[in-house]
Amino acid sequence: MNMRNFATTIFFAFSCGSLAQAAEKSVVTYHNSMDRSGDYVVPGLTLAAAANMHLDKAFKAKISGHVYAQPLYWRPAGAKKGEVIVATESNTVYALDANTGAVVWSAQLAGNVSLSQLPCGNIDPIGVTGTPVIDPQAGIVYLDALTNQSNVPTHMVYALSLVDGSVEPGWPLNVDQALKGFSSTTQGERSALLLWGGYLYVNFAGNWGDCGTYNGTVIQVDPAKIALVASWATRANGGGIWAQGGLAGDGKFLFLTTGNTFGASKWMDGEAIIRLKPGLAHSTSTKDYFAPSDWQQLDNEDLDLGGTEALPIDIAVSGSAPARRVLALGKDGKAYLADRSNLGGVGGQIAATQVSNGQIRTAAAVYTTSSGTMVAFSSPGSSQCSGSNITMLGIAASGKSPISTEWCTAFNGGGDPMLTTTDGTANPIVWVVGAEGDNELHGYNALTGASVYSGSDVMSGLHHFETIMAADHRLYVGADGTVYAFTF
């Protein structure tokens, strides 16, 4: 399937719940939608205009703390301009003027946690790591913060007013108190939060180094009651939910990926794609999970399937309804394609294709057209493209090779790709920052891989998994002590 010569394309994207009409232009969740596709519409940002992308030196943001979470964008009803919402490891949340970077408000939450207080890890200090989520109808941003409560690390789920950053009455929710057996000392939270169907979902893994006892865990919180109402956890120890996007949804089900479990002699929820629905019931039906046949070897070699989120995608089929699929990219370098309506259990994939010769650990961006689906990710190299690169996969509904490599191009860094079009269809561009590499912004023609922008503006303070956010004719990049804005 060669997708480079398509004359027409059609873009499909899921909305993140029922967004308020007044906040249609807001970016309220990780990768701009609950399916985590990473697609944005930026009018005027054509393939030609991309060459004029440059650092907006009039945007000057000064914040406190390291930034791992993706910034969000909030534009309330009637407002002439929006605000960039960014949370830091200092447990500080900011609303920044989207045009100037000036602080509109800031909120200092409970104190963060020093790495010396934890048995292992690689972020110091630790506060807010996972991307928050905005309820546009209520004007509230939700987030999880690791806090220091009487010298005890404790995950607290906060609800902040987007008017002034004040903590909403009755919040925060203490996760250790709400969930029996949960310990914030060994449970890490680096995945994005999700709002769906009136509930808030927060996901947990462990800390870097896999120390102590933890389980891949999802909690379902009822914001109206400020109460944990359901939870799901891997039956075996380990199996963390590490992906930056955390849960993804297709409007009917939720999907997550899990990492390696410890000492499991039979499959117990690790190395898997899991399908959930509200209530988070633990299903034994093979329709509700997929794991590779060699899951135990992946366990032993720490080659998590759960390094990136599951991507629910609809693939166009001529004369038929779209094929409902879900794609996962593993640290074993494979792309796994499964049927969303029946995940197939252990070994039940539609396809498992080696697409990288190293670990895939960053989120992907999805571009869906009238003739197929394309998925871009950062790779350490493959038989098609040696060395660090951006790879674009073509995903077909069926056939002998439903997963193929469309193009790959050299890229130095560990950022997460995202994608812009001018109208949902035209001028598709893959954007990514070379975090912990060249630390520059790069843009590629999504259909060919040709470079459309490679600037000389070197940023500092970027971390792996760095995720760009697009809004208000700008691309925003969170970094230690600041937010960068690029315009064209």
Image (cartoon, rainbow, N blue to C red):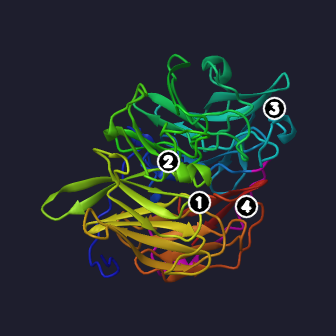
| Image side of residue 223 versus residue 153, left or right | left
Q: Secondary structure at mark 2?
A: loop
Residue stretch rendered in magenta on the structure: 42-66
In this picture, is 59 found above or below 52? above
Residue placed under numbered mark 3 in the picture: 111
| Mark in front: 2 vs 4 | 4
Pick whichever of labels 2 and 1 is earlier in the sequence: 2
Report the disc number at residue 26. 2
Disc 2 or 3, which lies upstream in sequence?
Answer: 2
Contact between labelled residues 4 and 1, with CB atoms less than 8 Å apart: no
Q: x, y (%) of residue 373?
A: 34, 65
Residue 21 visible in the displayed image: yes
Q: Amino acid at mark 1?
A: Ile
Residue under pointer 4? 462
Amino acid tagged 4: Leu
Q: Is residue 448 left or right of residue 341?
A: right
Q: Position of residue 113 (x, y in %)?
A: 81, 36
What separation in Å lies between label 2 and label 1 (alpha carbons)?
15 Å
Find residue 277 and name its label: none
- The reply to whether discs 2 and 4 touch (Cβ–Cβ < 8 Å) is no
Structural distance between the alpha carbons of marks 2 and 4: 24 Å
Rendered view: 281 above or below 9: above
